[in-house]
Amino acid sequence: METEVLALIMFAGTCLVLLAGFPVAFSLAGSALLFGLLGAALGHFDFAFVRALPQRVFGTMSNEVLLAVPLFVFMGVMLERSKVAEELLENVGRLFGGLRGGLAVSVALVGMLLAASTGIVGATVVTMGLMSLPIMLRRGYDPALACGSICAAGTLGQIIPPSIVLVLLGDQISTAYADAQRDLGNWAINPVSVGDLFAGALVPGLMLVFFYVAYQLAVAWLRPSSAPALPPRDTDVSRRMAFVTLLKALVPPLSLMIAVLGSILGGIATPTEAAGVGAIGAILLAGLRNEPGRQTVLVKAAVWALIAVLALSRMFDLRVAREAIDPADQVGMALAAIALIVLAGGLVVALWGLWRQSVLDDVMRSTTRIASMVFLIIIGATLFSLVFRGFGGDDMVHDFLTTLPGGKWGAIALVMLAMFVLGFFLDFVEIVFVVVPIVAPILLKMDVDPVWLGVMMAMNLQTSFLTPPFGFALFYLRGVAPPEVTTMHIYRGIVPFVLIQVAALGILAAWPELATWLPEVIFGGVAR
């Protein structure tokens, strides 16, 4: 009993240290090490758990799935620096601005597109806050509606793939599912992949966008003064010309999104390999926007070469390490080699141009900073989990969840409520690597679908960016909002969108098929 009390005190103490403003990674690791030493001194902790840390860290650093994190971060930062968001906002706003509530709808749609191409909440919220918020305020939009729309649209990158949250959750859910199945005596495990979560999150993510747009249009209809249409002088460009301009702005990021997601869902590439495709595509798109003259031709040729490589990998078996290679495959390999040479040349040109304009240096620094933060938190959370397990905390949680009234639904409801409340104070990375490894194996032993559980957790974690006092989307917008926008405007604005997310979570709980249908269609519907 004393051992379990130490586990509870350690968890509560860590939360207090985090609330005091100490760095997350060092708070997790420091609290765990301190309580581990205390527990060992009192005879309630076996320090062998801490000695397992180097092996765990090595496993994390050699985990091929987590390699997708810095690659997706690089892709997002590079696209953000290449001004994709600004062009999309300008053209989508021009197309829908003549409608009542059109600017708010434009923000939601652009947030969806940026989520599928960049997935970085801070970049999306800051960009739309700088560009859309002043325009919406000048046109008479209610500040709360404008702020809520921007913050909510910025968080879509956490649920719409490719998403860093889904990559991290996919790794944890996969491990938890394998552990749960082994504990149940099932050694013929059909593994869960990040690709399963990507496919499972697509429909719920689009459903959330639909709810956002429906709410914005309803507010514009019920309270026209809060979301007026742009005056005619701002929509004098013909609809046809606006649509053509929008297509020019839309095609590059949409093509990259299709290449990344299509290669995963089509079985051409793993999520890590697709992240590499996304990083290369982002470099080429940024190069097209920054390289003048004849050099642009080389970058355009590289874009087509990248498309050709993806197509050839689908049409031919390009594996070299084979005893016998068909003549058709030999032709495919030769064409792929030519395409790769062209691609390499275009990449060199694009990278040289981005380096000369100091874009590459900025992107690399941002990527290194974000990826280092994520992996340092993973290491701290790993030590925390080891000490927590050493105190028997996982057994305590298991006994508590399995004895709740309502069976598995009572346990799922409590876990979702706990994650929602923790989202007020903790970042999604801490929740993924501290809470999920403890509760996921328990829930998965109760005959819960792992893909559905992962998507439920991802949608729940999305709200952590919107809930005060530590919602990061609120901080990002507060930093770039005009002086006339108060903090209360932002807080009032996000309340309806948080309620929408909670309602969407309830719908997903009632109809798990929203998350499980697409993975079953794409990946064969093998029963787990």
Image (cartoon, grey):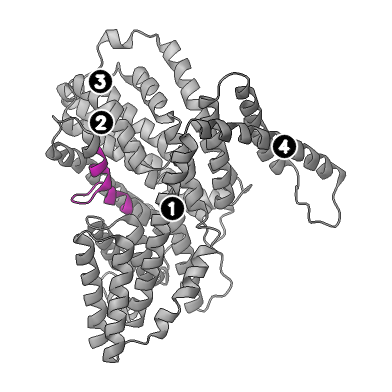
Q: From where the camera sits, is residue 59 visible?
A: yes
Q: Earlier in the sequence, mark 1 or mark 3?
A: 3
**In this orientation, which residue lies closer to the viewer: 336 or 190?**
336
Vertical position of residue 25 compared to residue 208: above or below:
below
What is the spatial separation of the Cα atoms under label 3 and label 4, in whole angstroms? Answer: 51 Å
What is the spatial separation of the Cα atoms under label 1 and label 3, in whole angstroms? Answer: 41 Å
Q: Residues within 10 Å of mark 1 (few under 14, many from 20)?
A: some
Q: Which residue is mark 4?
A: 341
Amino acid under disc 2:
Gln
Q: Is residue 471 left or right of residue 120?
A: left
Q: From where the camera sits, is residue 396 visible?
A: no
Q: Secondary structure at mark 1?
A: helix
For the stretch drawn in magenta, the main secondary structure is helix
What residue is shown at x 57% (from left), y 48% (from top)? 522
Q: Residues within 10 Å of mark 2 (few under 14, many from 20)?
A: many
Vertical position of residue 492 compared to residue 514: above or below:
above
Amino acid under disc 3:
Arg
Q: Residues within 10 Å of mark 4 (few under 14, many from 20)?
A: few
Place residue 441 in its image quadrant: bottom left
Magenta stretch: give its range.
460-477
What is the spatial separation of the Cα atoms under label 1 and label 2, in whole angstroms? Answer: 35 Å
Q: Earlier in the sequence, mark 2 or mark 3?
A: 3
In the picture, the disc for residue 371 is 1
Q: Secondary structure at mark 2?
A: helix
Observer-side mark, 1 or 3, equals: 1
Q: Which residue is mark 2?
A: 216
- The total number of labels drawn is 4
Amino acid under disc 4:
Ile
Please provide percent x and percent y for residue 321: 78, 56
Please provide percent x and percent y for residue 322: 81, 56
In the picture, the disc for residue 100 is 3
